[in-house]
Amino acid sequence: MTLLPDPLWPVIVLAVIVVGDGLLTFRPPKAIAACLDGVGFPRDWWWVIAVVKFLAAAGLVIGIWAPGVGAAASAGLVAYFLCAAAAHLRARYVGRDFWLNCLGMLVVCLAVLVFCFLN
């Protein structure tokens, strides 16, 4: 295990993706709104998702210089998307959004954790 990312570029790419994903939570496109409604996530709490994603992205960037922070942020994103997958399964909302968006992001986050921090 390494406490600083190696290679660095996947961590930066993931941070950019997560920031973009967080921005989309403020005024979600119909597909994202349908997904959040489909799993039964209350609209009053949608802002929390953006905060979590911005904090994760900040952790990934800070982790470029601060040992362990990026690994923790990466592990937190894996946990977040595992919880999202569980919410999809619990709600039986397992269409394209589940397979492409939720599990796709889980795989990307897990790959960054494994290849950049657990190598």
Image (spheres, rainbow, N blue to C red):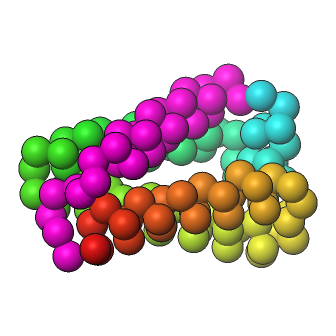
- Up the image or down, 1 lies above or below 73; here it is below
**Magenta run includes residue 54:** no
Give the extent of the magenta segment.
1-28
Number of marks in picture: 0
Which residue occupies 76% across, 39% down?
A: 32
Q: Residue furthest left?
A: 66
Q: Determine the residue positioned at 44% across, 34% down.
A: 16
Left or right: residue 55 versus residue 68 is: right
Q: Which of these two is toward me, 105 or 53?
A: 105
- Residue 116: give x, y in percent of width and height: 31, 62
Is residue 81 visible in the rendered structure shown here? yes
Q: Residue furthest top?
A: 27
Residue occupying the point 71% across, 29% down = 28
Image x and y of residue 91, in percent: 82, 68
**Nearest the camera: 66 or 55?**
66
Q: Is residue 56 visible?
A: no
Identify the residue at image location x=26%, y=40%.
61
Q: Nearer the viewer, residue 89 or 43?
A: 89
Residue 20 falls inside the magenta stretch:
yes
Question: Residue 47, how many percent across, how many down?
Answer: 54, 36
Q: Quadrant of the C terminus?
A: bottom left
Vertical side of 95 occupied by 54: above or below:
above
Please state, as top left, top right, bottom left or bottom right, where the N terminus lies in the image: bottom left
Left or right: 56 as drawn, with respect to 106: left
Per the picture, the main secondary structure of the magenta-coloured stretch is helix
